[in-house]
Amino acid sequence: MITFTEAAVRHIKKNLKKTLNSVGFRLSIKKTGCSGYAYVPAMVDQVVPTDLHFMAQEGLSVYIDPACETFIKGLIVDYVADNNTGLKQKRLVFINPNEKNRCGCGESFTIE
């Protein structure tokens, strides 16, 4: 359903170690912003029973909100250094083949 780069897995696993009682990484989307939807990544300490679950590389436990399954099919999650603002900021990046548009700030997207 979704793929993680090695850099993303390392980053997420590092953050899971810092989060008390964490059980895995959860991804959902919410309706927001100027374009429609935004990704909601989270380190979770409790499993939502209805979530879809799979194991990614290096034993990373991933939970997906089933309501967003069709929106994120084929998604690639990466962790990159963003130099666009002149400040080198590292962040998770979501590369989604289902996206049709992104807002100017890059925080929200549309899917047809």
Image: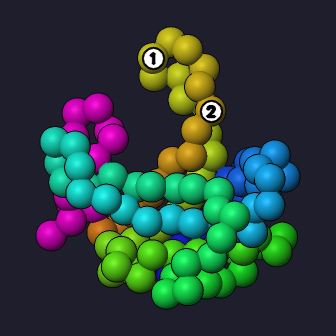
Q: Residue at x 56, y 46 (%)?
A: 92
Question: Is 41 drawn above or below residue 81 in the view shown?
Answer: below
Q: Where residue 29 appears, x then y in whole percent?
A: 37, 62
Q: Which mark is residue 85?
A: 1
Left or right of 97? Residue 83 is: right
CA gap between label 2 and label 1 equals 12 Å
The amino acid sitting under disc 2 is Lys
Instruction: Tell which of 47 and 56 is nearer to you.
Output: 47
- Identified at 52% across, 82% down, the residue is 51
In the rendered image, residue 38, in percent from the top left (x then y), is placed at 33, 52
Q: Please tell me whether mark 1 sits on a helix, a strand or a loop.
A: loop
47 shown above or below 76: below
Q: Are marks 2 and 1 in contact (CB under 8 Å)?
A: no
Residue holding disc 2: 90
Q: Which residues are magenta?
A: 99-112
Which image quarter holds the C terminus? bottom left
SS under mark 2: strand
Q: Is residue 56 left or right of residue 33?
A: right
Kind of residue indicated by mark 1: Thr
